[in-house]
Image: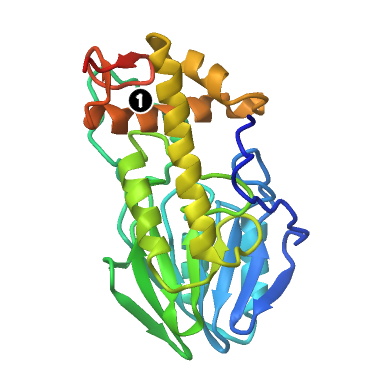
Amino acid sequence: MSDNDDVPFNRNFPLKPGVVEEVRPGVRRVLCNNPSPFTFTGTVSYIVGQGRVAIIDPGPDNEAHAAALLDAVRGETVTHILVTHTHRDHSPNTGRIKQATGATVYAEGPHRASRPRFESEKHNPESGADRDFTPDVTVAHGDVIEGSGWRLEAVATPGHTANHLAFAWPERKFSFVGDHVMGWSTSIVAPPDGSMIDYMDSLDRLAAREEELYFSGHGAEIPEGPRYVRFLIRHRKAREASILHRLAKGEADIPTMVRAIYIGIDPRLTTAAGYSVLAHLEDLVTRGVVATDGDPVITGTYRMAAA
């Protein structure tokens, strides 16, 4: 079985970088030209409202993208900048937009890991965190951010990062879900930045809500959002089952598990897949299902816990 047989992914996203597209009344999107195996065709920034608007996720440190966003709102006033999370493909352009518009920046807070780093862990400088970001206003779960003709509710969705928020528009049944849910691929959950326990709880939280149409940080909009989230939950549970199936045959390290589970994976994603397996293993060790010597780390060897 290949990695993605069980999720109805949509990899059709013809939007070109820099083009403004009104995807629904009151919602425009602009694609940044930063394609990669992790970002798909690039980061999608959203403009909410008309006349007096909010920009969600200004994107990476990219002058051309900032210019395209400012061009898209020419003659309008940007009152709010909302940031779903502090990865380098989402938040660094905030400074440029704020400087040009004077808008207030809203986010959960600065970047932080989901758990303290273990002594035995090497620091991974490739985590992609934007450690320079600080919002003007810190936002907690349930907080409401209102503008001219729009009203967004912050939904805490930690997992991909500890400070990840979705912004729901309950009246419209829309939700801006950042990287928590993506239509083109599963999200990366890489400890200690991310947490599988938090990620699964956050999927349950979204699935229980009424918003139907999801606007993601990468790729096309996702119709029937809660139904799609249930596919993702099943997918993660199947991944966990694959890990346990491999460990039932004997102890293994993470590269061995990745080879057994991710058949035909893009080699550029092997490291990320390893961290995703680690995220599952952390959860399984916490629950007492799997054992390891010392902390559950990327270099560890894992086995089924003694019954």
Q: Which residue is mark 1?
A: 123
Q: Is residue 286 above or below residue 225?
A: above
Q: Seen from this angle, which residue lies furthest top? A: 250
Left or right: 146 with respect to 294? right
Residue 184 spot, x, y in % from top left: 64, 50
Classify the position of the N terminus by image quarter: top right
x, y (%) of residue 106?
A: 36, 68
Residue at image location 63% in from the left, 87% down from the top: 75
Question: Could you say whether the residue bearing mark 1 is in a helix, strand or loop?
Answer: loop
Which residue lies at the image location 49% right of the left edge and 67% below the top edge? 176
Instruction: Please give the name of the residue rendered at 66% of the width and 40% of the height, measured from the top-left corner.
Output: 36
82, above or below 110, in the image: below
- For this orientation, the residue located farthest to the front is 307
**Residue located 62% across and 79% down the image:** 73
Q: How many marks?
A: 1
Please identify the quadrant where the C terminus is shown.
Answer: top left
Q: Residues within 10 Å of mark 1 (few under 14, many from 20)?
A: few
Image location (x, y in percent) of residue 290: 29, 22
Q: Is residue 225 visible?
A: yes
* Visible residue check, residue 128: no
Q: Amino acid at mark 1?
A: His
Viewer-proximal residue among 118 and 260: 260
- How far across and how far down the image is residue 214, in percent? 54, 66
| 280 up-or-down from 67: above or below | above
Camera-side residue of 197 and 218:
197
